[in-house]
Every structure is written in structure tokens, then in C-alpha cells.
Amino acid sequence: MERAVLVRYRVMAYVTATLLAILVFVGIPLQFAASKPEVVNTVGTIHGFCYMVYLVVAFDFTRKLRVPTGRMVLVLLAGTIPFCSIVAERKLTKLYDRHVVTAGGVGDVGSAAEVG
């Protein structure tokens, strides 16, 4: 597997997590406390679009890593909880690095029967 797949996944995980954190911790309080829905409208729309891209990229990455279906679903849902996509990204990056080392290079990652 190419490292570019990992980089795409990592970028989308961080972008999705950052936008969701802004939405939850800044936008929603501003909407209710100050009656300013602009942040929620703007950041919410951008996060929604980025989450769809995250789903595609995460699905592609987990399929190439041969992650079991249950774990794949958890990775896909990680973009809906603040900071969870960052936690999932760290775990999948470690898994990727472990398999690259055992495969002897950045070529084929090999089987990912042990995920965790």
C-alpha cells in the first residue's frame, strides 16, 4: 500500500475532528448563548461535507489494511464524536507502521488480522 493513502486518511481525520470540535465547543454555545447561528451554519456545512470525504477515505484505508468489519465501522463513526477520529487515526497509523516494518518496506502492507 502506498503511503499516500495513509496521508489522505490522516489529513481527513484531523480536519474532521477540528471542524467538529469547533462546531460543538464554539458554534453551538454561540448559537444558544448569543443567538449567533452563523458559526453553526457555516462550520456545520463544511464538517458535513468533510465527513462524507472522511468516510470514503477511511473506508478505502481500512479496506487496504484489511481491518475487520466491526473495527472499520468504529473508524467510520469516529468522525461523529469530537476528537475520536484523532484517536482512531493514531491507532491505524501504528497498525500501518507495524505492517510496513514487517512487510519490509512501503510496498504491500500485508494481512492485518491483528488489529488493536
Image (cartoon, rainbow, N blue to C red):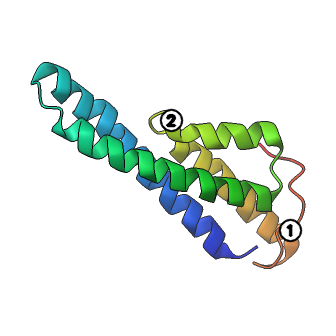
Q: From the viewer's perspective, is residue 48 above or below residue 29?
A: below
The residue at the point 61 percent across, 45 percent down is 88
Q: Is residue 84 left or right of residue 45?
A: right
Q: Are marks 2 and 1 in contact (CB under 8 Å)?
A: no
Task: Name the element at disc 1.
Answer: helix
The residue at the point 61 percent across, 59 percent down is 57
Quadrant in which the C terminus appears? top right
Of the numbered discs 2 and 1, the one sitting upstream in the chain is 2
Quadrant in which the N terminus appears? bottom right
Give the image location of residue 108, x and y in percent: 83, 74
Q: From the viewer's perspective, is residue 83 above or below residue 10?
A: above
Residue picked out by circle 1: 102
Residue picked out by circle 2: 80
Give the image location of residue 9, x and y in percent: 58, 60
Q: Is residue 109 left or right of residue 61?
A: right
Q: Is residue 47 left or right of residue 60?
A: left
Q: Quadrant of residue 40?
A: top left
Visible residue check, residue 94? no
Q: Is residue 23 left or right of residue 103?
A: left
Give the image location of residue 61, x and y in percent: 69, 60
How dense is the environment of label 1, judged by Cα within 10 Å: few (below 14), some, or many (20 and up)?
few
How dense is the environment of label 2, judged by Cα within 10 Å: few (below 14), some, or many (20 and up)?
some
Give the total of numbered labels: 2
The residue at the point 73 percent across, 54 percent down is 62
Amino acid type at image mark 1 = Thr
Amino acid type at image mark 2 = Thr
Give the image location of residue 25, x and y in percent: 29, 31
Q: Viewer-nearest of labels 2 and 1?
A: 2
